[in-house]
Amino acid sequence: MNAHNRPRTVPADSAGIAEAAALLQAGKLVAVPTETVYGLAARADRAEAVAAIYRAKGRPDFNPLIVHVPSLSEAAALAEIDARAEALAARFWPGPLTMVLPLRAGTAIAPAVTAGLPTLALRCPAHPAMQALLAAARLPLAAPSANRSGAISPTTAAHVGQSLGQAVDLVLDGGPTAQGIESTIVALRPSGWSVLRPGPITAEQIAEVLGSGGEAAAPGAAIEAPGQLASHYAPGKPVRLGAVAAEADEFLIGFGAIAGHASLSPAGDLAEAAARLYAALHEGAAAQQPRIAIAPIPESGIGAAINDRLRRAAA
Ligand code: TXA
Ligand code: MG
């Protein structure tokens, strides 16, 4: 993409946040930093603003969006909060946990946000710039990851510009994101709970709060968890997993003792690997080699979320 196709990008300081809040109130699209990945935000109560998100991403309209709120009390205005949701919020909000809860009747949330589902995905992000923006805009903000649908998620403002260009009205640059992988999504149902998307908060941590009763996510429950489509986070070239050495035509993403052309974490630290994952995939996508290979990643802790993303990147 040419430099002149890049969106206007400003630092996530008080002037940037004030400009972003005004644009959002006017129904525009603003890319925002969160602790997980950059989001493409619009006011969740206006159908045209939400439609612009789907258009900018090229996102299938059966794939519902996460709504971001500044605290549990704003969440309670939009969805039914039971004792389990209260306990999870007390432990993990603000932070990288999204809860799928029964949508309250009569809220102003645009129907396109939930893609017609009777549930709403809610997240209270911890990033100070996103918190300041929610306070300034005084609106619930729908925000999927700020990338073309199916492509690699953005962990820097530059990634957003490369993927979306001028489809976004403003990018708030808050530097590289800290966690690097999308929030954990947990669905709370009358019959129990399940993790729809693994993320920085593990199923074990959720079980510590809710007790057992976690159900396995039904594979192929495509309408309930459309972000769990088999192919996602695609770098646009073949990806080989579990690689211990590079073939001649491969860009190798290393981990631990396997150095590679770029390393997710030379020390073998999984949190660091998650933070660097999408930047490494972007680097592999831009590299001269026609293929990408990736070292084995342990399945423990946040490794489960990393491997979930890698399987979809390779699919
Ligand atoms: O970390 C994150 O969650 C980032 C940042 C920007 O907050 N956002 C993000 O949004 O990853 P997105 O749109 O890329 O992923 C939203 C996921 C999709 O898998 C979608 O299917 C699921 O949330 N989702 C949204 N509403 C849902 C609902 N009512 N029931 C089940 N899944 C839902
Ligand atoms: Mg996404």
Image (cartoon, grey):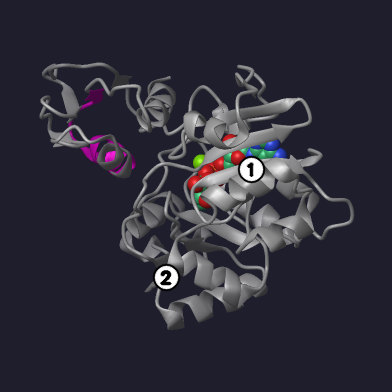
Q: Reply above or below: 46 against 307.
A: below
**Can residue 59 be seen in the rendering of this structure?**
no
Q: Quadrant of residue 128?
A: bottom left
Q: Residue at x 54, y 45 (%)?
A: 97
In the visual, does 276 lie left or right of 83?
Answer: left
Say which amino acid is labelled 2.
Arg
Q: Quadrant of residue 76?
A: bottom right
Inter-mark Cα distance, 1 to 2: 32 Å
Cβ of mark 2 under 8 A from ligand 1: no
Q: Nearer the viewer, residue 148 or 245?
A: 245
Q: Nearer the viewer, residue 229 or 90?
A: 90
**Can residue 138 be seen in the rendering of this structure?**
yes
In the visual, does 9 lie left or right of 185?
Answer: left
Mark nearer the viewer, 1 or 2: 1
The secondary structure type at the circle numbered 1 is strand
The secondary structure type at the circle numbered 2 is loop
Which residue position is annotated with label 1?
A: 99
Q: Position of residue 268 (x, y in %)?
A: 19, 32
Most extreme residue toward the right, as rendered? 106
225 magenta-colored: no
Local crowd size for mark 2, using a 10 Å CA cut-off: few (<14), some (14–19), many (≥20):
some
Magenta segment: 276-294
Q: Position of residue 176 (x, y in %)?
A: 31, 56
Q: Position of residue 146 (x, y in %)?
A: 48, 51
Q: Residue at x 29, y 18 (%)?
A: 241
Local crowd size for mark 1, using a 10 Å CA cut-off: few (<14), some (14–19), many (≥20):
many
Q: Earlier in the sequence, mark 1 or mark 2?
A: 2
Which residue position is annotated with label 2?
A: 8
Most extreme residue toward the bottom, as rendered? 15
Say which amino acid is labelled 1.
Met
